[in-house]
Image (cartoon, rainbow, N blue to C red):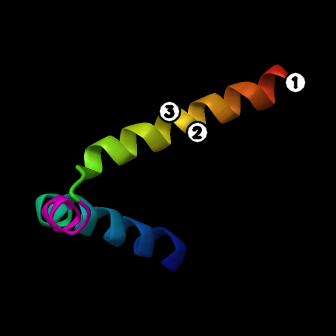
């Protein structure tokens, strides 16, 4: 039961505090967190495609 509740709570907190998290990373690293997530998602898609292709 805990293996379902804990990720749900973590996901909910990330969604709830997304603006504060994004602002913190922008102040710290001068890069928007949205760009990092898009790049990571594209890299995962490319990696999965390459694994399936072979």
Q: What is the magenta segment's predominant secondary structure?
A: helix
Q: What x and y, as percent, mark residue 21?
A: 20, 65
Q: Which residue is mark 2?
A: 44
Pointer 3 residue = 42
Q: Is residue 30 above or below residue 50?
A: below
Is disc 1 surrounded by few (<14), some (14 to 19) or many (20+) residues within 10 Å?
few
Q: Are marks 3 and 2 in contact (CB under 8 Å)?
A: yes
For mark 2, give the secondary structure.
Answer: helix
Q: Residue at x 38, y 38 (%)?
A: 38
Classify residue 26 as left or right of residue 3.
left
Q: Is residue 21 visible?
A: yes
The answer for how far apart the CA atoms under marks 1 and 3 are is: 19 Å
Which residue was labeled with disc 1? 54
Which residue, as the protein is rendered here, is positioned at the far top?
A: 53
Q: Disc 3 on helix, strand or loop?
A: helix
* Residue span colored magenta: 22-29
């Amino acid at each position: 039961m805990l293996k379902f509740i804990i990720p749900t709570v973590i996901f909910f907190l990330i969604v709830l505090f997304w603006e504060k998290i994004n602002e913190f990373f922008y102040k710290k690293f001068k890069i928007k967190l949205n760009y990092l997530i898009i790049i990571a998602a594209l890299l995962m898609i490319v990696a999965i495609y390459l694994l399936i292709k072979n």
